Image (cartoon, rainbow, N blue to C red):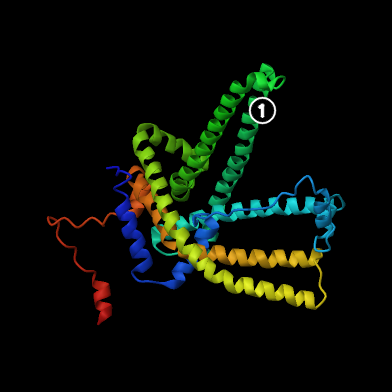
Amino acid sequence: MPVSAVDAINPAFQHAKQQLLQPFRFALWIRLAFVGFLAGEAGSGGGCNFNGNIPSSNHPRGSQQFMDSPWIPQFIQHPEHYVGLIILLVVVAIGLFVLFTYISSVMRFILFDGIITRECRIRAGWVRNRDRGFRLFVWQILWTLAFPAALAVLAGSSALLVWRMRWFDHPSDHLLPLIFGGIAAFLVLLLLVLVFSVVYVMTKDFVVPQMALEDTTAIEGWRRLWSSLSAEKGGYAGYIGMKIVMAIGAGIVLGIATAIVAFAILIPIAGAGVAAVLAGKAAGLTWTFYTIAAAVIVGCVALAFLFFVGSLISVPAIVFFPAYSIYFFAPRYPALAKLLWPQPPPSQSPGWPTPPLPLVPALLIF
């Protein structure tokens, strides 16, 4: 019988406890942290604030003196001279996004296998799931492109409506419609973000198992899932609501733990960075393209290390949330239920006589 969103919590918790602590294997934690980080399952709450002083209009020379400072690189002072470099950086950023999307797609199947088998074999999982990961990768790219397309449709339709109503000709005369129209557009934007987020979550929770077990496409998986959704809207809505609540709670707890550990790690990293800058100044180095590129690379490495540490702290959540979706979906998906709860082999009927042992192996013993 299908279980509710609340009923699936306890078996998922027991699964995570047994896989991670009975027995405790640090190597398994490292592999799960690596896979969860690349699969996009690890996450921590947090925020950052940017406080800057905007130059006053009464002192226009202040900003010019700042831009003329020798500490400001030339390509920031004159970006028009580095158009080719900017285009190259944009192309590299897009290429890295595509690459990590593909890696994330394959790692999603490796994580699913790791939850089912209670092991995590990255190399064998990569070889086994490359084709499935590519199909999921194509779906993720198309879905990612669909979001800005939907935003463009929303912005274009809103601008067309305002233009047809001629509200921008005399905006002071149409202040109330503009305010309510802006609120309506913002609500539609929130609804759009919610829909895209829910579709993404349900894809990785309920479509990926179908792709892994039956080698289907994401479209076919969604067609089957839609039939199940139509028949049980309340159950899946409860699942989404419960997962949001648990994700908020886990994000707060893991965010606090990650912030404490990150602060302890950042102190020596910041000290090393200050020492490197002072040593560079003493050696006569200045901020050029190469020194800034080296600083960016070092910063990216340090940031990746911090993310991995956060992922290592988030391993319980990396295991619990996929297990939660598996235990919720298994009663609704027979192939997953058969894999999760294998049936014991049928016992021999007591009415049938036991077949005699073959003579040849018995003679060979002697």
**Secondary structure found at label 1:** helix
Vertical comparison of 357 with 336: above or below: below
Q: Residue at x 56, y 32 (%)?
A: 186
Vertical comparison of 240 with 310: above or below: above
Closer to us: 233 or 279: 279
Indicate the amino acid at tag 1. Answer: Gly
Vertical comparison of 199 with 259: above or below: above
Say if residue 237 shows up in the picture: yes
- The percent coordinates of residue 91 (x first, y second) are 74, 51
Question: According to the image, label 1 marks what residue?
Answer: 156
- The C terminus is located in which quarter? bottom left
- The N terminus is located in which quarter? top left
Q: Residue at x 58, y 67 (%)?
A: 305
- The percent coordinates of residue 249 (x first, y second) are 40, 52
Residue lying at the far right of the rendered structure: 81
- The percent coordinates of residue 34 (x first, y second) are 52, 64
Q: Residue at x 30, y 55 (%)?
A: 11
Q: Residue at x 42, y 55 (%)?
A: 250
